[in-house]
């Protein structure tokens, strides 16, 4: 999955669902690359009946096809003024942090390593459906764009489809690649999802 430069993310449709699941595909071949599933703590399920889901803690496991253990986890705590999301490996060791701006009305997320150094920044357009991942020097490291799913699905469900395109990996640094993929997935799951 980390070697893929293009990943199609399809949210599974569900009625009154309290946790999300996303399928990950290779857009050219249609081959499954794995899935992401939200596994919030039990008290988050209860809170989601009275509080917006985006403000409650959650954990998202990213599981490659053919495996049962996650490749990495995305962990969000309670959200007050801004979201802070931790990314950790399968053993629970920190890889980095995703931090939104305080009280921002658009997507503007800092992607930080474990030393709090900025790896990238995620910014979105005014419509909120197209995003760029850029290095601190401004080099585009990737893009995230919403894919149209048809009138019926768009009007009557909150399910989203996204295409993640990451620049060719020249560094061979799996931690940076993991953080870029985590940032792309976290946009919808941890920063935007209102359901």
Image (tube, grey):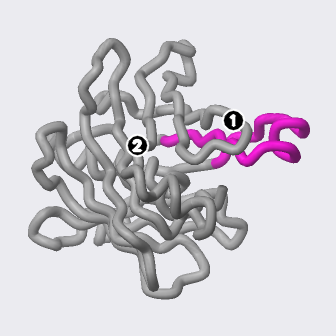
Residue at 35% x, 36% y is 62
Q: 168 or 4, which is in the foreground?
A: 4
Residue 162 within the segment the image draws in magenta: yes
Sort mark 2 into few (<14), some (14-19) or many (20+) by Cα contacts within 10 Å: some
Secondary structure state at the residue bearing disc 2: loop
What residue is pinned by disc 1? Answer: 14
Point out which mark residue 180 bears: none
Establish if 99 lies above or below 187.
below
Q: Position of residue 42 (x, y in %)?
A: 41, 50
Which image quadrant: the N terminus? top left
Residue 188 within the segment the image draws in magenta: no
Q: Quick one: label 2 or label 1, which is nearer the N terminus? A: 1
What residue is pinned by disc 2? Answer: 39
Establish if 8 lies above or below 43.
above
Residue 120 shows up from this direction: no
Q: CA distance from mark 2 to mark 1?
A: 16 Å
Q: Which residues are magenta?
A: 146-164
Q: Position of residue 127 (x, y in %)?
A: 72, 67
Q: Position of residue 51 (x, y in %)?
A: 58, 69
Residue at 51% x, 87% y is 103
């Amino acid at each position: 999955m980390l070697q893929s430069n293009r990943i199609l993310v399809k949210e599974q449709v569900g009625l009154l669902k309290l946790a999300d699941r996303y399928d990950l595909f290779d857009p050219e071949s249609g081959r499954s690359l794995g899935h992401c599933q939200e596994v919030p703590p039990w008290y988050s399920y209860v809170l989601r009946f009275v509080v917006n889901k985006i403000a409650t803690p959650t954990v998202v496991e990213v599981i490659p096809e053919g495996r049962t253990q996650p490749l990495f986890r995305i962990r969000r705590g309670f959200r007050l003024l801004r979201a802070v999301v931790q990314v950790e490996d399968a053993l629970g060791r920190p890889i980095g942090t995703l931090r939104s701006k305080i009280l921002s009305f658009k997507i503007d997320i800092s992607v930080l390593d474990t030393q709090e150094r900025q790896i990238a920044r995620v910014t979105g357009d005014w419509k909120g459906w197209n995003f760029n991942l850029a290095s601190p020097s401004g080099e585009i490291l990737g893009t995230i764009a919403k894919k149209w799913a048809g009138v019926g699905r768009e009007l009557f469900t909150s399910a989203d489809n996204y295409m993640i395109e990451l620049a060719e990996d020249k560094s061979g640094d799996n931690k940076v690649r993991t953080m870029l993929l985590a940032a792309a997935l976290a946009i919808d799951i941890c920063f935007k999802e209102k359901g």
